[in-house]
Amino acid sequence: MSDAVTAAVATTGPGADPFALLGLPRGMDVDPHALDDAYRQLQAQVHPDRFADKSEAERRVAMQWAAAANEAYRTLKKPLPRAKHLIESAGVGLGEQDNTAMPADFLMQQMEWREQVAEARAHRDDKGLRHIEHDIRGAEGRLWPLLSERIAAADWPAAADAWRRLRFLEKLHDDIEDVRAALID
Amino acid sequence: MALLQISEPGQSTAPHQHRRAVGIDLGTTHSLVATVRNSIATVLPDEHGRVLLPSIVRYGQDGVFAVGVEAAARQAEDPRNTLASVKRFMGRGLADVAKTHQGDLPYDFVDSPGMVQIRTAAGVKSPVEVSAEILRVLRQRAEASLGGEITGAVITVPAYFDDAQRQATKDAAQLAGLEVLRLLNEPTAAAIAYGLDNAAEGVYAVYDLGGGTFDISILRLTKGVFEVLATGGDSALGGDDFDRRIACWAIEAGQLPPLGARDLRALQVEAREVKEALSSREAARFHVKLQSGDPVDLTLDTATLESLGANLVTKTLKPCRQALRDAGVDIADIKGVVLVGGSTRMPMVRAAVAEFFGQAPLTNLDPDQVVALGAARQAHLLAGNRSGDDWLLLDVIPLSLGIETMGGLVEKIIPRNATLPIARAQEFTTFKDGQTAMRIHVLQGERERVDDCRSLAHFELRGIPPMTAGAARIKVEFEVDADGLLAVTAREQSTGVTAQVAVKPSYGLSDDDIARMLRDSFDHARDDLDARALAEVQVDADRLLDAVRAALAADGEALLSDTEREAIEARIVALAEARVGTDRSAVRQASDALSTATDDFAARRMDAGIRSALAGRSIESI
């Protein structure tokens, strides 16, 4: 992020809460089939294609609703954005841009993994990548229940901490996928 | 037309009125038009029974030109004025064209702001104008076949087309006098045709290798919903590239001297024929007579073709891997692979696709026609011809959108493969004390640096009140509609002052350009039509008056203030007065005025309609 032009939090469509918009109970536990159904039903009602014979002004309204439906679906579909929404709507910032206050042992572990990824890349070692992924999944397996539990308990600072750790791990997964794609090409 | 009755979502207001709508596949190599008749999608042939119209336009000394087969027949003889594959130049600058073609094209390119143009015997032509000629022929074909004016068209574009290429395509359609119901992605159109015909459910891949573009789309088909999960591709990779490789091979193998434009074009035309022949044979004769009178007589076998094209085929697999990853889908999840585009007839392409996806691709449909057929079905639906088994189409944006920040970096606002329509806003601030204007540079692409992305537009936000650096809050909103076209607005919020945004699109034609070109291209023999035209505007006016009166009676009290209501009523009176006269433009103006005055009201009714439709689910907070 540039020091001169700073981006603030992205805002969504007509300001609807995604759980309310999709008619789903609030919380980390979202049934993926119920979510898909709710999303498709909502789009079937509001999508501008349903109003193709209406005026521009009317189709615009439909487009805003459809955009809000898409944003809500995107927010709830994957657990990290879902948790982010729950934590932030409780008024707790996640400080994605500037958070460096992670505990030293976690940061050490991160650096170690990153070094291993770089090494696996240099040696074109897919087995090594799989090994690191296995370790990361282990760490995630411990963090996810903690995150859900802290959110359910409305313990937002602890939830935010677990979320930031999981976000780090997700980035690491992405990096590994990038390396893998680069090895194939 | 502003206020139509609010009906139940998903139901047509006029179920019995069949509207003539067509789907058009505007291809690099050839184009075609299809429509739905008696519930069956069918391609429309020309008067000689030919379905495929070669996408070739020939301009002559006296301005006359030929489109299609007649133009194709002359391309080796008159290469500079016979424009083929212009789809590759849509929304592209001279630098882009030079980068992908390295001087192997016989055209006299003219650099111009936004989009490259080509100098012909009939003057300088933009790719938009050339495309419009092709579309015009298809429109005439459809009108002759359907017996009347067509109300709208769905035009297909490669899924990987960026905003500039889409806008150029829409401009071309407008220039050809077509009302664009939707720009539809080609692989999505194919999925609609395939999915509806086969009642397919599950995750499918559509591999679309056309004459000049490559797309891969991953879709999830469920009952009544076509949901694109991810798309990827290369908008400058297609059958043409194989032809060029073969032509280069002929130059080397035949040890040919440096050749002129005519000979080069002749080699490419022959290359394409030989390539097509090799889809069903082991070897084919490559025979061309050069301008010098010397013959080129060679034999190309499939093994040589495969080695010439191997890395082109490999180039398609990287976007496939990326699309699968973006879709969050494993190869094992893919239930079927639909092949689209004439280039997928090549056995080497089929073999590579089968190997990559671990299954034989589906070939039970005509790869040349499936896109137009799908487009026709979508056009039929969008024109309001509802049938009860309607489907919903959810497509994605192929490339990320963002704006330039300090240091030549791109800040992404909308990520690639986000589902359309989409609206996202982001706040920015000033970096100098007293700064009153801000330049906003809109870009599309995946790379981090501005120079590596496509510049779409420059906006200037003026009238920001002078403040200390960082105090202004400028909200930039990106909105991408279902056509994949972007609109950007910017507003300064901290003081409540709304500043104007000046839009300068880097690509595409302005509305004025299009209006001028339309005027130029139509003959002015319109007066005969005046009587009919008057009757038409009167009917429209009556319909509008009825709709507005009914809407006022139903919701005027609840949704309008007294002042708003009075303003609308004044315009009702004005239209009713104009309606009884014979001044066509007065009726139209009064209709437009009433229409505009009721836009807000129409939007509010729409919003209220959606809210009440959703109300069964008891959500107070929406």
Image: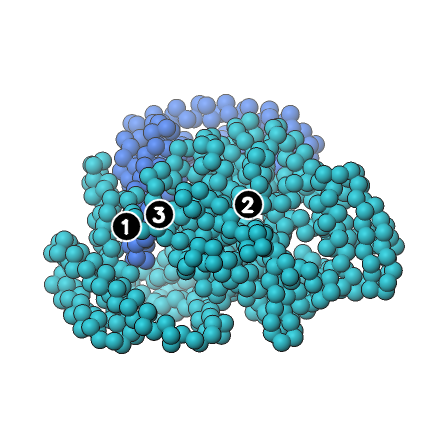
Chain colours: A blue, B cyan
User: Rounded to the nearest whole Å, what is the CA distance between mark 1 and mark 3?
Assistant: 9 Å
- Whichever of callouts 2 and 1 sits on the residue coming sooner in the sequence is 1
Q: Is residue B119 above or below residue B601?
A: below
User: Which amino acid type is marked by label 3?
Assistant: Asn
User: Which amino acid type is marked by label 1?
Assistant: Ala
Name the chain letter of the residue that bears numbered label 1.
B
Q: Between A62 and A86, which is closer to the camera in this rendering?
A: A62
B258 relative to A27 in the view: left or right: right
Q: From the top left corner, tell me how far across and down residue B390 is, in percent.
A: 36, 40
User: Which amino acid type is marked by label 2?
Assistant: Gln
| Residue at 37 percent of width and 72 percent of height | B529
Q: Is residue B547 above or below residue B8?
A: below
Q: Can I make out residue B2 in this image?
A: yes
- Whichever of callouts 2 and 3 sits on the residue coming sooner in the sequence is 2
| Residue at 11 percent of width and 63 percent of height | B562
Q: From the top left corner, tell me how far across and down residue B111 is, in percent.
A: 62, 69
Residue B437 occupies quadrant: bottom left
Q: From the top left corner, tell me how far across and down residue B570 is, in percent.
A: 16, 70
Secondary element at tag 3: loop
Residue B369 numbered mark, or none: 2
Number of numbered discs? 3
| Residue at 51 percent of width and 48 percent of height | B43
Name the chain letter of the residue that bears numbered label 2.
B
Q: Between B388 and B18, which is closer to the camera in this rendering?
A: B18
Circle 1 Cα neighbour tier, 10 Å, few/some/many (<14 / 14–19 / ≥20)? few
Q: Can I make out residue B84 in this image?
A: no
User: Rounded to the nearest whole Å, what is the CA distance between mark 2 and mark 1?
Assistant: 30 Å
* Circle 1 residue: B14
Q: Are marks 1 and 3 on the same chain?
A: yes
Name the chain letter of the residue that bears numbered label 3.
B
- Residue at the extreme front of the image, as rendered: B48
* Circle 3 residue: B385
